[in-house]
Amino acid sequence: MKRILVTGAGGPAGVNFVRSLRKAEEKMFIAGSDVNKFHLELPGLDKRYLLPKNTDPEYIEKVNEVINREGIEFLHPQPDSEVGVISENREKIHAKVFLPAKETIRICQDKLESAKVWKSKGIPVANVLEVKDENDLEKAKEVLGMPFWLRATRGAGARGSTLVENLETGTHWIKYWESRRVGWKFIAQEYLPADDIAFQSLWNKGELICSQARVRLEYIYPELAPSGKTGTPSVAKTIHDEKVNKAAYECVKAIDPKATGIFCVDLKKNPEGIPCPTEINVGRFFTTSYFFTYAGINMPYLYVKLAYGEEIPDVKKFNCVPKGLYWIRHMDSGPVLRKEGEWRSEKI
């Protein structure tokens, strides 16, 4: 029986990762860790462990303590920050991981650096500029036009993002976060108003194993975020778009020709209809990984089998599930899957 540890297991992404593994026919021992004892009650785990934040000097030691106590063979870090810490300390971990190269993770976790790589390789990309002060905001206005996105270079869930429609907003936005002493660096990014596209994929030694794209249609509590985007969709729909597939494939290969593990690409189409990558969420799954599992392609389970060096069934490299599938979810409401036009409401 496989023995697995999932860090950040109490968050929505961790819960959906565990839920996907539980849907596999193979039975596995799954332990989970988190910093929140309440959230750890949510996933279907065999054992639950409270760990310190990954910034704690004892974090790696505590992870290994769990690994040794439970005989863990494989570690999956789900939160973005923990992917980075585990990656940098992978030689110290007493279990196997299935992560891309350290440098790949460093680049992908920095939106400015990844954009520089794509631009140097001739890949169409949403233009970005580093922003430190008001002079940089003025330059962003000249180069990108108005409006433009202002966002933190690192972090998930639309961290530090707002739409700048006047420079006063941008100035106060930066000053606000400086007053909070979060230490974030910011970029200005070209505003592309087209669909918000997400491409989830698995790779092994530079070979694409499988992938599926979706478009985010609505977000959970968008009114609570200045940007109107919380990173987590309440409604998403599967799409089959060869331009999206090609763009996502090429932007991964541009950063890592030997890509291994999970690469989740965010893209927006420019005015010419060309999909442009805006970031890669690397080493971890999107929050809604269970969507595709429920629809027929259990990527978390395939990922675990790859990590163990096992044979996997034949799967499509692209378009693994039908298009036009809607994943609808909300707080305390549970998810439902609906096909295009399969609506039960009546308009009066």
Image (cartoon, rainbow, N blue to C red):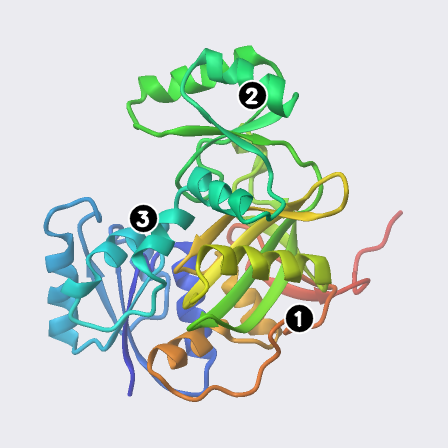
Quarter of the image containing the N terminus?
bottom left
What secondary structure is found at the residue carrying circle 1?
loop
Circle 3 Cα neighbour tier, 10 Å, few/some/many (<14 / 14–19 / ≥20): some
**Which of label 2 and label 1 is nearer to you?**
2
* Rendered image: mark on residue 129: none
Residue in the image at 20% along x and 44% along y = 55
Q: Quadrant of residue 93?
A: bottom left
Does residue 147 show up?
no
Discs 3, 2 touching: Cβ within 8 Å: no
The image shows residue 341 at horizontal and vertical percentages of 82, 62
Query: Is 134 situated left or right of 237 in this image?
Result: left
> Which residue corresponds to mark 2?
140
Discs 1, 3 touching: Cβ within 8 Å: no
The image shows residue 313 at horizontal and vertical percentages of 52, 88
What secondary structure is found at the residue carrying circle 3?
helix
**Is 280 situated above or below 272?**
below
Q: Nearer the viewer, residue 186 or 50?
A: 186
> Which residue corresponds to mark 1?
319
**Kind of residue at badge 2:** Ala
Circle 1 Cα neighbour tier, 10 Å, few/some/many (<14 / 14–19 / ≥20): some
Query: Is 219 situated left or right of 156 in this image?
Result: right
Q: Mark 2 to mark 1: distance in Å? A: 37 Å
The image shows residue 68 at horizontal and vertical percentages of 12, 73
